[in-house]
Image (tube, rainbow, N blue to C red):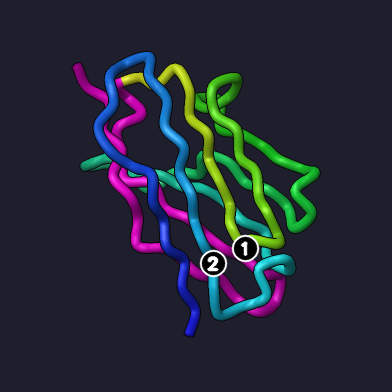
Amino acid sequence: QVQLVESGGGLVQPGGSLRLSCVASGFTFSSYAMSWYRQSPGKERELVAPIDTTGRNTNYADSAKARFTISRDNVKNTVYLQMNSLKPEDTAVYYCHARHAWAGEYWGQGTQVTVSS
């Protein structure tokens, strides 16, 4: 059965760092583009950063550029989001997403990130 399990969220002070992980199982991870999304209360879910199947091509929302780094390990079936210089506006539930051109897509259950002093 397909699973995307996120971890690494928590409470951090402004300016701090967190590393989110998403471990995939039940599908061919290396064939899926992966992304991190986030959703704050009262707001729509937004794309933070996608990464292609090889890990060589990435992109970032303007709010994440120069602070966040997405990466993947196709041996460990894991995608990461390194988040530095965190701001209160980064507070959200962060979701892992897997997408295949024709096989469909999957979502993780989300991990809460709270940036507060």
- Would you name the residue on which mark 2 appears? 24
The relative height of residue 114 versus residue 5 in the rendered view (above or below) is above
Dominant secondary-structure state across the stretch colored magenta: strand
As rendered, which of 4 and 104 lies closer to the eye? 4
Q: Residue at 38% of width from left, 14% of height from top? A: 15
Instruction: State the residue lying farthest toward the bottom.
Output: 1
Q: Amino acid at mark 1?
A: Asn
As rendered, which of 59 and 117 lies closer to the eye? 117
- Would you name the residue on which mark 1 appears? 77
Whole-percent x, y for residue 77 in the image: 62, 63
Horizontal side of 40 relative to 54 (left or right) equals left
Whole-percent x, y for residue 84 in the image: 48, 22
Whole-percent x, y for residue 57 in the image: 77, 43
Q: Quadrant of the C terminus?
A: top left
CA–CA distance between discs 2 and 1?
5 Å
The relative height of residue 67 versus residue 26 in the rendered view (above or below) is above
The verdict on residue 17 being magenta is no
Q: Are marks 2 and 1 in contact (CB under 8 Å)?
A: yes
Which residues are drawn in magenta?
Answer: 88-117
Q: Residues within 10 Å of mark 2 (few under 14, many from 20)?
A: many
Q: Residue at 32% of width from left, 24% of height from top? A: 89
The verdict on residue 90 being magenta is yes
**Element assignment for label 1:** loop
